[in-house]
Image (cartoon, rainbow, N blue to C red):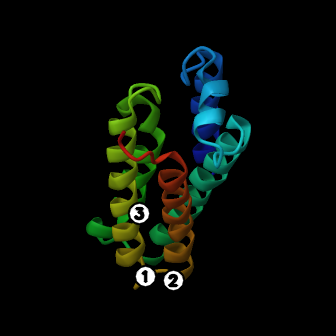
Amino acid sequence: MAGAVGLAVLVNGLIFAFDLRGGGAGQRNRAEFPLLPPAWVIGAVWTVLLATMGYVQSRVLRRTRERGLVGLVPLLFANCLLYPAYTAGFTDELRGLLGNLATLALSAYVAGRLHSVTRLGAALIGLVLAWTLFATFATFRLPG
C-alpha cells in the first residue's frame, strides 16, 4: 500500500510540477466544467483510490494465487496511473472520454471478478468506478 501511495504522490507531483493540465487551462477548465473540484482535491482522491487498490491487492494475494485474479488490480492500477499519459496530459477530450470509458469498464470487470475472493475488495474497487463515473459526467460536453 505504501508503494501505491508513493507512486500516486509522484505522478500527482509531476502533473502539478509540469502543469500537465495546460498552462493556465486549470482556470479555464473550472469555468468549462463547474462540477469538477479543484485540482488538489482530484489529486487527493486519486491518491486515496490508488492506495485503496494497493490494499485490495494485498487482500487478493492473501486469499488466492489464481493468476487470472492476481493480475487484475495491478492492471487497473496501471490504467489509472497512466491516465495522464494516454490522454495527452489532459488536453484531448476524446481521449479523456475514451480513457474514462475504459476505466469504467475495467473497474467494473475487476470488481465483479474479485467479488468471489474478497467482497470488501470488490466494494473498494467500486469506489474507482464511482469516481470515474462522476468525472466522466463532470467533464462531458454535448457537441455543438
Identify the residue under disc 2.
119
The residues bearing labels 1 and 2 have C-alpha atoms spaced at a distance of 5 Å
How far apart marks 2 and 3 lie (CA) works out to: 14 Å
Q: In the visual, does 113 lie left or right of 12? A: left
| Residue 6 horizontal/vertical position (percent) | 63, 38
Residue 61: x %, y % from top left:
46, 67
What SS does tag 2 mark? helix
Name the residue carrying label 3.
Answer: 107
Q: Residue at x 40, y 54 (%)?
A: 76
Q: Quadrant of residue 68?
A: bottom left
Where the C terminus falls, by quadrant? top left
- Front in this rendered view, residue 11 or 24: 24
Mark 2 vs 3: CB contact within 8 A: no
Query: Is residue 34 shown left or right of residue 121?
Result: right
Residue 57, how many percent across, how many down? 49, 62
Name the residue at 35% across, 42% down. 143
Q: Earlier in the sequence, mark 1 or mark 3?
A: 3
Q: Residues within 10 Å of mark 3 (few under 14, many from 20)?
A: many
Residue type beneath disc 2: Arg
